[in-house]
């Protein structure tokens, strides 16, 4: 499992329309094999900055399965014109995950 991370800078004044179009675009990404979940979070300090987190089964599910699909072209048409600058997308793999109490920590080595 990997996490796609993108910091999105949306052109000022377009935040509301971006959020509406993002909600429409969700059907394209969620239809891809290997997609597990995603979240879009708005920055408190800078209202035109968003954090996109997408969980994929594998890196290839994102970089090949999604990015080389017709669904990606629809996603791109709906969303890419909102960004300035265009976001850098990075991928991360779990090392440690903790929820609740400290004695419930999980690591890849456990």
Image (cartoon, rainbow, N blue to C red):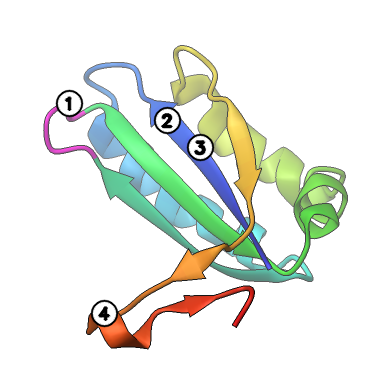
Residue at the (81%, 45%) spot, across then down: 63
Q: Residues within 10 Å of mark 1 (few under 14, many from 20)?
A: few
Percent coordinates x, y for residue 98 in the rendering: 37, 75
Q: Is most of the magenta stretch helix, strand or loop?
A: loop
Residue 86 quadrant = top right
Residue at the (48%, 52%) spot, across then down: 53
Q: Residues within 10 Å of mark 2 (few under 14, many from 20)?
A: many
Which residue is label 2 attached to? 8
Residue at the (74%, 65%) spot, across then down: 32
- Real-space CA distance between mark 3 and mark 4, rounded to the nearest whole angstrom: 28 Å
Which residue is label 4 attached to? 102
Count of numbered marks? 4
- Real-space CA distance between mark 4 and mark 1, rounded to the nearest whole angstrom: 31 Å
Percent coordinates x, y for residue 56 in the rendering: 67, 64
Q: Residues within 10 Å of mark 4 (few under 14, many from 20)?
A: few
Disc with the residue nearer the chain's start (4 vs 2) = 2
- Single out the mark in the foreground, 3 or 4: 4
- The region drawn magenta spans 43-47
Disc with the residue nearer the chain's start (1 vs 2) = 2
Contact (Cβ within 8 Å) of mark 2 with mark 3 = yes
- Real-space CA distance between mark 2 and mark 3, rounded to the nearest whole angstrom: 6 Å
Residue at the (25%, 17%) spot, across then down: 12
Residue 42 quadrant = top left
Which residue is label 1 attached to? 46
Contact (Cβ within 8 Å) of mark 1 with mark 2 = no
């Amino acid at each position: 499992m990997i996490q796609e991370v993108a910091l999105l800078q949306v052109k000022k004044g377009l935040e509301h329309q971006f959020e509406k179009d993002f909600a429409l675009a969700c059907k394209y990404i969620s239809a891809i094999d290997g997609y597990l979940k995603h979240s879009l979070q708005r920055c408190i300090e800078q209202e035109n900055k968003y954090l996109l987190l997408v969980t994929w089964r594998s890196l290839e599910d994102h970089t090949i399965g999604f990015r080389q699909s017709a669904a990606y072209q629809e996603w791109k048409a709906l969303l890419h014109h909102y960004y300035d600058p265009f976001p850098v997308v990075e991928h991360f793999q779990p090392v440690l995950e903790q929820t609740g109490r400290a004695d419930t920590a999980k690591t890849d080595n456990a």
